[in-house]
Image: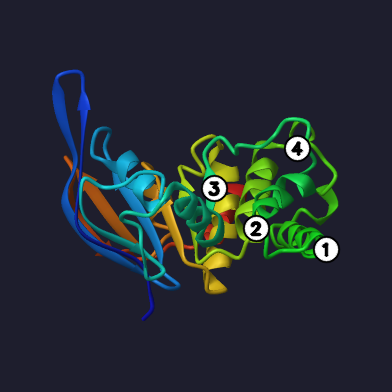
């Protein structure tokens, strides 16, 4: 299998006042192409720090980290920015949408920073991504004209438009009710079935069951890295609908 993320003996330490906090204590794992992985951990476990590193937002104190065979260590800020833009599709808990901007424009926005994509290609990619998440008839709508679930679909479309090697979802169902959460997980499972690599950060055990592997962090260490008996989000959605 091709490796999308490779982490070896990763450490992250930072200072809070006079105290040194060891958020990550030499963890190692890989995520392969086409995997759907959930990362879980209690508050203070280093989950947020790991999310930052996975998103190339932060550098480790020690250890090695590679994404799509590109080592992150000692990269310049411009290089890290390019990696974020080209390699990772971000989906956030709070959607991170601009309030007076249409869905189509929201999805186009990250592509503005990719000089290899023409204006025509940018529009085509944005339209295709919105169709892929079921929002063909909502392209001109602004966030205040859409439900929370629809806003999250816009965020997913925005992440897909750049054709990243990986989707990185940070508590992507955290602001949604159970039914809408399952609808969003149906979409993630559909994307996974088409070959998309997904890392899904969550604190909800039921959401983790929709992935195929769970990495559990505690006190800066990986305490479990196990295959999951994947549940069907579609079946769960139907069970609460009927």
Q: Which comes sooner in the sequence, label 2 or label 1?
A: 2
- 89 left or right, relative to 148: left
Assign a secondary structure to mark 2. loop
Mark 2 = which residue?
A: 114
Which of pointers 4 and 1 indicates the residue nearer the eye?
A: 1
- 172 left or right, relative to 22: right
Tell me, yes or no, whether the two marked residues, 4 and 2, touch with CB atoms within 8 Å: no
Q: Which comes sooner in the sequence, label 4 or label 3?
A: 3
Assign a secondary structure to mark 3. strand
Which of pointers 3 and 1 indicates the residue nearer the eye?
A: 1
Up-down relation of residue 205 to residue 117 (above or below): above
Asked whether 241 or 33 is in front, the reply is: 33
Up-down relation of residue 96 to residue 89 (above or below): above
Rendered image: mark on residue 120: 1
Residue drawn where x is 74% and y is 63% of the image? 125
Which of pointers 2 and 1 indicates the residue nearer the eye?
A: 2
How many angstroms separate mark 2 from mark 1 (CA)?
13 Å
- Colour style of the rendered protein structure: rainbow
Q: Which comes sooner in the sequence, label 3 or label 1?
A: 3
Which of pointers 4 and 3 indicates the residue nearer the eye?
A: 3
Assign a secondary structure to mark 4. loop
Mark 3 = which residue?
A: 91
Residue drawn where x is 55% and y is 63% of the image? 164
């Amino acid at each position: 299998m091709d490796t999308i993320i490779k982490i070896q003996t990763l450490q992250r330490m930072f200072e809070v006042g006079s105290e040194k906090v060891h958020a990550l204590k030499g963890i190692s794992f890989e995520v392969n192409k086409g995997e759907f992985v959930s990362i879980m951990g209690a508050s203070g476990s280093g989950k947020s720090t790991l999310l930052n590193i996975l998103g190339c937002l932060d550098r480790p104190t020690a250890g090695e980290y590679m994404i799509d065979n590109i080592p992150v260590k000692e990269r310049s800020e411009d290089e890290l920015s390019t990696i974020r833009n080209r390699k990772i599709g971000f989906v956030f808990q709070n959607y991170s949408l601009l309030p007076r901007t249409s869905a189509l424009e929201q999805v186009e926005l990250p592509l503005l920073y990719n000089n290899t994509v023409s204006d025509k290609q940018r529009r085509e990619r944005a339209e295709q991504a919105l169709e892929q998440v079921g929002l063909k008839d909502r392209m001109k709508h602004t966030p205040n004209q859409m439900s929370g679930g629809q806003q999250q679909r816009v965020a997913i479309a925005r992440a897909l438009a750049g054709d990243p090697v990986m989707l990185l979802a940070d508590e992507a169902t955290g602001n949604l009710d159970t039914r809408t959460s399952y609808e969003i997980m149906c979409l993630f499972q559909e994307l996974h079935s088409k070959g998309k690599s997904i890392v899904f950060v969550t604190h909800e055990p039921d959401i983790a069951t929709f992935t195929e592997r769970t990495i559990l962090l505690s006190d800066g260490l990986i305490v479990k890295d196990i295959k999951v008996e994947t549940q069907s989000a579609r079946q769960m959605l139907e069970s609460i609908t009927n």
